């Protein structure tokens, strides 16, 4: 379905981003991977993706906490492939603390990566997508883009911001062959969440699995984790003809979290 299309997926060396990159590659899209990690592991992932799906896959290690680097990531993709069709703004970080204890530098870092990078990437990609009359901006927000949780001020503010930015992007591109949507996952068991499970285990003196059940029980009625593969399927849907008129939407994939 996506043969000949080029997808840039930020933060795709692990977790949700890798799940989405894999799903898009499985549909034939050429992929630009991005994110941090062990160079040998990243190369294994890149080569594996290309081989398994018969697509081109490249890696760009841009640090997306800097606006200019985000814009360069997009321009590098266009230089290498001649186009950018799909931009998945996925890279994100977390820090938890009460507002009065929240380190200002952590606030700045979360806003820079989780919100401002989405703006810079979108700004760089849209001229190419408008010219092509086809484009998909897919922003990985969160259930925390729709509701709050204590101790997550920066993350919740950034993710609510991403949903607002998604709506404006949709309005500015309506009717031009470009759509912009946010995916709002509930708990996905990635490195980002494993750290929070470890913190619960330490606080409550329980093992990692009991802490994982506690984490789910508090927020996610299904009591099951969302998987990166399921989110990959959601991204593929947003790139499909069925989703041509889906724009400005926030799609919850959260086991019922935001239904209550
Ligand atoms: P993860 O920690 O597994 O992956 C984060 C990715 O971002 C990694 O590839 C990492 O290398 C990359 N990254 C971190 N800092 C970067 C930087 N400065 N520049 C470029 N890349 C950088 O986390 P994840 O859970 O897969 O999170 C992916 C996205 O999904 C985030 O935006 C997160 O907020 C969102 N999300 C996660 C969950 C969850 O439960 N895991 C739920 C809702 C939303």
Image (cartoon, rainbow, N blue to C red):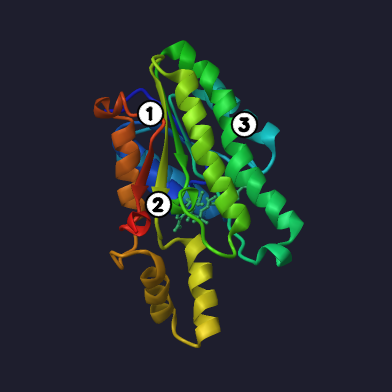
Q: Give the number of the mark in front: 3 or 2.
A: 2
Q: Based on the displayed image, in which of its 4 quarters is residue 15 positioned? A: bottom left
**Residue plotted at (38% across, 69% down):** 216
Q: Residue furthest left?
A: 242
**Residue plotted at (51% across, 27% down):** 168
Relative side of 186 to 237, left or right? right
N-terminal label among 2 and 1: 2
**Residue plotted at (52% across, 36% down):** 164
Dividing the image into 4 quarters, which one contains the N terminus? top left
Residue 231 in the image: state x and y as whole percent: 35, 47
* Mark 3 Cβ inside 8 Å of ligand 1: no
Q: Which residue lies furthest to the front in this view?
A: 260
Label 3 to label 1, Cα distance in Å? 19 Å
Q: What secondary structure is found at the residue carrying circle 1?
A: loop
Q: In this picture, is 239 found above or below 127? A: below
**Residue plotted at (36% across, 33% down):** 55
- For the residue pair 153 and 39, the one nearer the viewer reads as 153
N-terminal label among 3 and 2: 3
N-terminal label among 3 and 1: 3
* Mark 2 Cβ inside 8 Å of ligand 1: yes
Q: In this picture, is 14 found above or below 164? A: below
CB within 8 Å, label 3 to label 2? no
Residue 152 in the image: state x and y as whole percent: 58, 60
Q: Based on the displayed image, in which of its 4 quarters is residue 226 positioned? A: bottom left
Q: Characterize the local packing of mark 3: few (<14), some (14-19) or many (20 or more) Cα atoms within 10 angstroms.
A: some
What residue sits right under mark 3 in the picture? 120
Q: Based on the displayed image, in which of its 4 quarters is residue 207 positioned? A: bottom left
Residue 247 numbered mark, or none: 1
Label 3 to label 2, Cα distance in Å? 22 Å
- For the residue pair 88 and 200, the one nearer the viewer reads as 200
Residue 230 numbered mark, or none: none
Residue 47 in the image: state x and y as whole percent: 43, 43
């Amino acid at each position: 379905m996506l043969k000949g299309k080029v997808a840039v997926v930020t933060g795709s060396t692990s977790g949700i981003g890798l799940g989405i990159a894999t799903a898009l590659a499985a549909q034939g899209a050429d992929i630009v991977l991005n994110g941090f990690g062990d160079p040998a592991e990243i190369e294994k992932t890149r080569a594996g993706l290309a081989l398994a799906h018969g697509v081109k896959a490249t890696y760009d290690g841009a640090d997306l906490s800097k606006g200019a680097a985000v814009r360069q990531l997009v321009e590098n993709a266009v230089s290498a492939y001649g186009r950018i069709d799909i931009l998945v703004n996925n890279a994100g970080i977390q820090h938890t603390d009460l507002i009065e204890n929240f380190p200002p530098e952590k606030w700045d870092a979360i806003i820079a990566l989780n919100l401002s990078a989405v703006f810079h990437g979108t700004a760089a990609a849209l001229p190419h997508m408008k010219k092509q009359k086809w484009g998909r901006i897919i922003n990985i927000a969160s259930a925390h883009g729709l509701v709050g949780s204590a101790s997550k001020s920066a993350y919740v503010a950034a993710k609510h911001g991403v949903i607002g930015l998604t709506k404006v992007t949709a309005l500015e591109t309506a009717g031009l062959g470009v759509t912009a949507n946010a995916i709002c996952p509930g708990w996905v068991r990635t490195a980002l969440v494993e750290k929070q499970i470890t913190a619960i285990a330490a606080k409550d003196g329980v093992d990692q699995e009991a802490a994982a059940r506690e984490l789910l029980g508090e927020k996610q009625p299904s009591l099951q984790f969302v998987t990166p593969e399921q989110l990959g399927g959601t991204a593929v849907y947003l790139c499909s003809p069925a989703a041509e008129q889906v724009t400005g939407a926030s799609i919850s994939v959260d086991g019922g979290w935001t239904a209550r």
